[in-house]
Amino acid sequence: MESNELKPNTFFVEVSGSGLPEVDGLFVPSTAPPVESESGTVSTLGYWNGKLAWDRADGKCERSPALSYSNSYTSWRICRRDGHLAYDITCEDELPPTDREWHVYKKGVAPAPKVVLHHFDPREPCPKPNVIFILGGPGSGKGTMCQLAETQLGWTHLSTGNLLRAELQAGGPTAATIEEYITAGKLVPNEITVTLLRNAMEKATRTTGKTNFLLDGFPRSLDNMEGWYEIFGRDAELPRMLYFECPYEVLEKRILGRAKYSDRSDDNVESMKLRFDTFKAETLPTLELFKGKNKVVEIDASQDRPTVYALVGESLAEHTDQDLAAQPLTEKSEMLLGLRPYPKRG
């Protein structure tokens, strides 16, 4: 591959947990000039042996770059500041693996470090997310459409309920407060909910490079919006909203149909009525707020799923990678759209 065909190295690598101060830290795109490597490959700026390469952020390694690929040994390697090899992993991956344990070399220490790939410089503020709020009554299909947009269109689907449950399970710093409120049947404080959303978006942006987010079921109330303003500021541009409009009779029929297969305790007529009444009382005022600012796209969710999905795709097209959108439907997507039956249990 000619050097002028190589894409610039825009990734950053964070290494932690090695126990070696001269290894742990941030690795930045290499500025090493073109040179012939040990396998005879002429490297270019930001590359070594034809693959991306990194120097230490706090001072170059004597053998530059400090995180590079060896064609001779078909392995990625992390060097100490003195140039000695500390860790390596045998593979032909285009980027340093983050999902497997590295081998501890004689100049390293056990255990092997954790390696995290950043799409943006972690020393700089995270790029702003492109957010779309997703609202609709229980059974309107918004969760299904969010899954499809994630699978087929490359958007990131975040649910506040899932984030709260994950924080509880992980025993995070706010887990005790979350458990206290949920046990008492109260809404978790806005500051916690919106902070979890912000952190999840920032982590996804830095580790995946994606900035398009669908926030499923948020904001549930005007009070939620106040929490959003507190974290993101009132001067920040208000996100757009997709609202899944669906008559109560259709929602009820869907929920009762879903109850035959789901394990959800709230898939029954009584719970459905309570959820719908709460939705009307608390959530619809936020819809009116967004309508007043011309920030709402209303989608008739009473139609069949392929039609609704097509409308969702059109609404998201401005920020969607059209090469992704043109890809054939996955098996999972076909099942979500009702075009393929789900495999029978047992």
Image (spheres, rainbow, N blue to C red):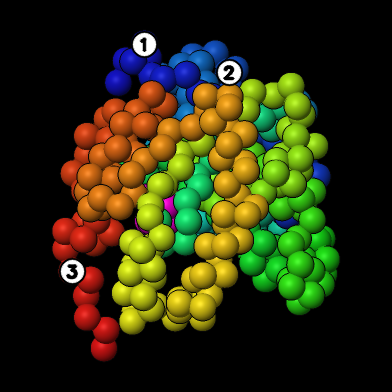
Q: Is 37 in front, or is 14? A: 14
Can you give x and y, in whole percent of width and height, for residue 8 in the image? 47, 19
- Quote the CA–CA distance across marks 2 and 1: 16 Å
Element assignment for label 3: loop
- Which residue, given by chain and number where applicable, does mark 3 sit on? 341
- Which residue, given by chain and number where applicable, does mark 2 sit on? 32
Element assignment for label 2: loop
Can you give x and y, in whole percent of width and height, for residue 16 in the image? 71, 49
Instruction: Tell me, yes or no, if residue 54 can be seen here.
Output: no
Quarter containing the N terminus: top left
Quarter containing the C terminus: bottom left
- Quote the CA–CA distance across marks 2 and 3: 55 Å
Q: Is 121 in front, or is 149? A: 149
Looking at the picture, which amino acid does disc 3 mark? Answer: Pro
- Which residue, given by chain and number where applicable, does mark 1 sit on? 4
Looking at the picture, which amino acid does disc 1 mark? Answer: Asn
State the image quarter where residue 274 is shown.
Answer: bottom right
Can you give x and y, in whole percent of width and height, for residue 94 in the image? 40, 38
Q: Please report contact status of discs 2 and 1: CB closer than 8 Å, yes or no.
A: no
State the image quarter where residue 299 is shown.
Answer: top left
The answer to whether residue 334 is left or right of residue 226 is left
Measured along the vertical axis of the image, is residue 316 above or below residue 107?
Answer: above
Could you tell which of marks 3 and 1 lies nearer the N-terminus? 1
Instruction: Tell me, yes or no, if residue 236 can be seen here.
Output: yes
Q: Is 161 in front, or is 5? A: 161
Magenta extent? 141-146
Categorize mark 2 by other alpha carbons within 10 Å: few (<14), some (14-19), many (20+): some
Looking at the picture, which amino acid does disc 2 mark? Answer: Ala
Categorize mark 1 by other alpha carbons within 10 Å: few (<14), some (14-19), many (20+): few
